[in-house]
Amino acid sequence: MRGIKLMMVPALLVGTLTACTPGSQPVAALAMRDDRPLAILVTCGGDFAQISVYRNDETARPTPTGRVDTLVEWRVSGEPAGEVVEAPLFGTPPVGWQTGDPTSEPPEGQSARTVSLTELTPGVRYSLSGHSGRDSAPVHFTTDDLGRIGADDVLAPVSRRESEIMSRRTFERKAAESCDNS
């Protein structure tokens, strides 16, 4: 009996620790407006938000030494004006937001330098993510996916590895539920 009690203590501690830190939530999506990609982030009540798109291909893979040499990324950040933020990729950021200029050499202790992503290239895999009150699960896509997104649809994560097209209304409902349940 004593062994069972001792085993329960670590399990309770792990459960408590993981309950304090919510995992990534399906709160970011990719839409199309006027034939241009548009990032959407449900803010979960956060007072600061960030949206980023990065190349998720060979440029982001570790070298044989374990280093990632270059991160190719576009990002915007600012204070959300509402529960849902829209940011056109590579366009003018939302009012009060700023475009990050990630072109830089790695800071001390980090191995990757960052280069600005300025356009989407066919055949390359990208990931869109965001943060505001919660980290978003990534939206994985290629330029081929953009043409499949209808006027009232979004490409949204259904798991950490998969994204699928759904109505924007469904996405926003699910995102709001995940904000409330985390």
Image (cartoon, rainbow, N blue to C red):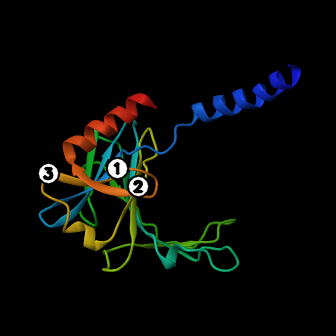
Q: Residue visible at 31% across and 38% down?
A: 174
Name the residue tied to disc 2.
129
For residue 168, side relative to residue 135 (left or right): left
- Residue 176 drawn at (x, y percent): 32, 34
When asked about the image quadrant of residue 93, the answer is: bottom left
Category of crowding for the residue at label 1, using alpha-carbon neighbours closer than 10 angstroms: few (below 14), some (14–19), many (at least 20): many
Rendered view: 92 above or below 144: above
- Name the amino acid type tagged 2: Ser
Q: How far is disc 3 from disc 1 in space, using C-alphas?
A: 15 Å
Q: Percent from the top left, x then y, of residue 163? A: 35, 57
Give how far apart the Cα atoms at labels 2 and 3 are. 20 Å
Task: Identify the disc placed on residue 152.
Answer: 3
Quadrant placement of the N terminus? top right
- Amino acid type at image mark 1: Ala
Identity, as a three-letter code, of the amino acid under mark 3 = Asp
Q: Earlier in the sequence, mark 3 or mark 1?
A: 1
Mark 2 vs 1: CB contact within 8 A: yes
Q: Is residue 46 visible?
A: yes
